[in-house]
Amino acid sequence: MRRTLAAALLVSLAACAPRVQSPPAAPMAAQAAPGPVFPTDVAAARAAYIAAWQGTDRAALASFFAPDARVVFSDETYDGRAEIDRRWLAEDVGRVSELVMTPAHVTADGDRVTEAGTVTLLFRAAGGESHAERGTYEHVWARQPDGTWKLQTVHMDSHPAPPQ
């Protein structure tokens, strides 16, 4: 009988006790995974580089490349900042607009940061007509002896985007 009475008392006390509720779980959409993270100084250099493409100042754009930088396209390679400026920037500066580089992967290893992702842009041809391009890219940023971050390597594979 004591057991029955003790059990009834425990049930009664449990029913009267305040209930602690767990906070509701956040919806899955609110728990989106964070995107790739750049070191602050690389993020600033990267943003300025992308913005520089919107203008026509070749010297400003060339300043983002290390002296021994390399730019690789599927059909051409440019070695060194002087060649990059003379052969690539001279042709394309002022023709690129709406440049969007969306990193999918960022890895930092000491004085090097590698980013890879997708790129979209508008390109104005010599005749004035514009067309959209999209593709993939990989940039390797390297810390220079003066502490600044410059592009060491650029791999770009972009193609005309189909009309929408």
Image: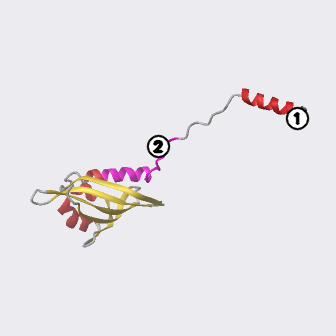
For image coordinates 22% across by 65% down, the residue present is 88
The colour scheme used to paint the residues is secondary structure
Residue closer to the observer: 104 or 50: 104
Position of residue 31 in the picture relative to residue 99 (left or right):
right
Picture quadrant of residue 76: bottom left
Looking at the picture, tell me which residue is in the foreground, 24 or 72: 24
Which residue in the structure is indicated by mark 1? Answer: 3
Instruction: Name which of mark 2 and mark 1 comes first in the sequence.
Output: 1
Instruction: Judge by depth and name the residue closer to the eye, 125 or 30.
Output: 30
Residue 72 in the image, given as x and y percentages of width and height: 30, 69
Comparing 156 with 90, the one in front is: 156
x and y percent of residue 163 in the render?
Answer: 20, 57
Q: Residue 28 lies in magenta, yes or no? A: yes
Look at the numbered disc 2 and give the secondary structure of its residue. Answer: helix
Question: How many numbered marks appear?
Answer: 2
Q: Residue placed at 17% from the left, 63% from the top?
A: 91
Q: Is residue 65 left or right of residue 86?
A: right
In the rendered structure, which segment of residues is drawn in magenta? 26-48
